[in-house]
Amino acid sequence: MSSEKITSLIRAIHDALQSSEQLDGVQQTISRLDALDLDGHRCSPLPPQIPLHFEGELKAAVEHIPASLKTVAQALSAAAPFLNWNAETDSSAGYYEAGADVGQSFLDGNLVCRLVGPGESFFFSEDLFLSLFFLKPRTLYRDHAHQASEMYFNLTGPCGFRLGDEDWVDYPGDSVIWNPPSRPHATRVYGIPFLSAVSWVSDLDSVCRVVPRDDWQGLEAQLQAG
Ligand SMILES: [Fe+2]
């Protein structure tokens, strides 16, 4: 059944996160997942959905999940036919403040599957967002900030992150980032598609605002040149 596959996927993410439990946000994510009634089959009937042109790339992303996350990769493959993916194609809708300059690279390359949250998610929670977040190769996810602190559990890599005013750092598949409230962050994706389990554990109604940097166009051109 589809709900069992999605439950197994959430469990696999939960279990894999336990090795990073020392990070505050990870611990909170785990305890909020523990509080969910995953066995109660409270799966909302979201229809399976994926924009067609993403299908192959998403499959490629799953193939790049490292052996250390084999259980997550298997659960993801099993759940894949039932997931509900949405692309944010209009910066005036969704998570961003109106008119946010998120860039064409992001708009063309993002996909989100909401697993847990207060609405439009497979499981209801009023204090946890857990989503799968996909970005196409050579995408720049421009610097942005929000009141909610955020966990990125990167399933693929390497991918680059710029956290606050620090320089870019590359993170491998099976890495965890905990970004504190309101610290700007950006992501750049190289040749391997980006797939991450992302969580918020507070301020779920936060609005994302972009934080302008003067190197975006150069970075986007560099990524496109491959
Ligand atoms: Fe963010």
Image (tube, rainbow, N blue to C red):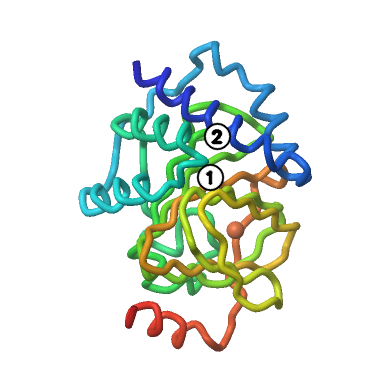
Q: Furthest residue to the top?
A: 40
What residue would you read off at disc 2?
Answer: 13
Is 78 left or right of 69, judged from the image as shown? left
Which quarter of the rendering shows the C terminus? Answer: bottom left
* Foreground of the two, 127 or 31: 31
* Quadrant housing residue 46: top left
Position of residue 115 measured from the top left corner of the image (x, y, whole percent):
49, 34
Can you tell me whether the CB of the residue at mark 1 lies under 8 Å from the nearest atom of ligand 1?
no
Q: Quadrant of ligand 1?
A: bottom right
Q: Seen in the image, is 194 located left or right of residue 11?
A: left
Q: Position of residue 49 (x, y in %)?
A: 29, 38
- In the image, 54 versus 14, the foreground residue is 14
What amino acid is at disc 2? Ile
Tag 1: amino acid: Ala
Q: In which quadrant is the N terminus drawn?
A: top left
Residue 118 at least partly seen: no
